[in-house]
Amino acid sequence: MTVYTKAYGKIDVDERQKITFPAGLYGFESLKDYVLLDGEKQPFFWLQSLESVGAAFVLIDPFLFRPDYEMDINDDELTEIGVQTPENALFFTIVTVPQDGGPMTANLQGPIVINRKQRLGKQVILNDPRWRTKHDIQQELAGSKKAVC
């Protein structure tokens, strides 16, 4: 299928890259259909709305820079998108890239969960005080490397 994207312009993508968010994302509840695209630079991805070219989000796997990240998600929320085991899901966090050159941050308080098989997604809100909406990715990555050494 042909998709118009914020990052890449008009591109062709496989139908299997389509992800439906029945409840939308927080602040974008009316937008339900997206495609998951590889970013130009790893380890980033793009979540591009199919309904609004301007609605595109940079994503990252939170476990890459926070190996201690824990998500205490209510089973009912996971059941809504058919996730029964963690192996059946992909987990991402939304990245903010400030235009002023400030640090890239990730929202660990509001992760995105995607059912791999059914291609359904949901953004959840965690009540754990360790996780905030702005975690400096580079700083956390440097901290996790020091902890391993």
Image: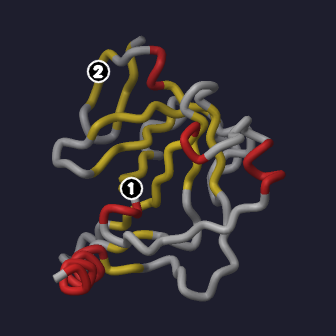
User: Label 2 sits on what residue type?
Assistant: Ile
The residue shown at (60%, 36%) is 115
Q: Is residue 102 above or below residue 1?
A: below
Give the residue at the far front of this rendering.
149
| Disc ID at residue 61 | 1
The residue shown at (39%, 63%) is 63
Residue situated in front as seen by the camera: 63 or 136: 63
User: Label 1 sits on what residue type?
Assistant: Asp
Q: Quadrant of the N terminus?
A: top left
Q: Quadrant of residue 146?
A: bottom left
Give the residue at the far right of this rendering.
76
Q: Secondary structure at mark 1?
A: loop
Q: Quadrant of residue 149?
A: bottom left
In the picture of the structure, the residue carrying the numbered disc 2 is 11
Residue situated in front as seen by the camera: 52 or 108: 108
Q: Is residue 129 above or below residue 119?
A: below
| Disc ID at residue 120 | none
The crowd level at tag 1 (other Cα within 10 Å; few <14, some 14-19, many 20+) is some
Residue 102 in sight = no
Q: Nearer the viewer, mark 1 or mark 2?
A: 1
Give the residue at the far top of this rendering.
1
Q: Is residue 87 above or below residue 18?
A: below
Estimate the x, y position of residue 39 in percent, counting from the top left: 25, 43
Residue 107 in sight = yes
Q: Is residue 72 above or below residue 45?
A: below
The crowd level at tag 2 (other Cα within 10 Å; few <14, some 14-19, many 20+) is few
Whether tag 1 and tag 2 are in contact, CB under 8 A, the answer is no
Q: Quadrant of residue 127?
A: bottom right
Label whose residue precedes the other's in the sequence (1 or 2): 2
Estimate the x, y position of residue 46 in percent, counting from the top left: 36, 43
Relative placement, left or right, of 89 versus 3 is right
The residue shown at (45%, 60%) is 94
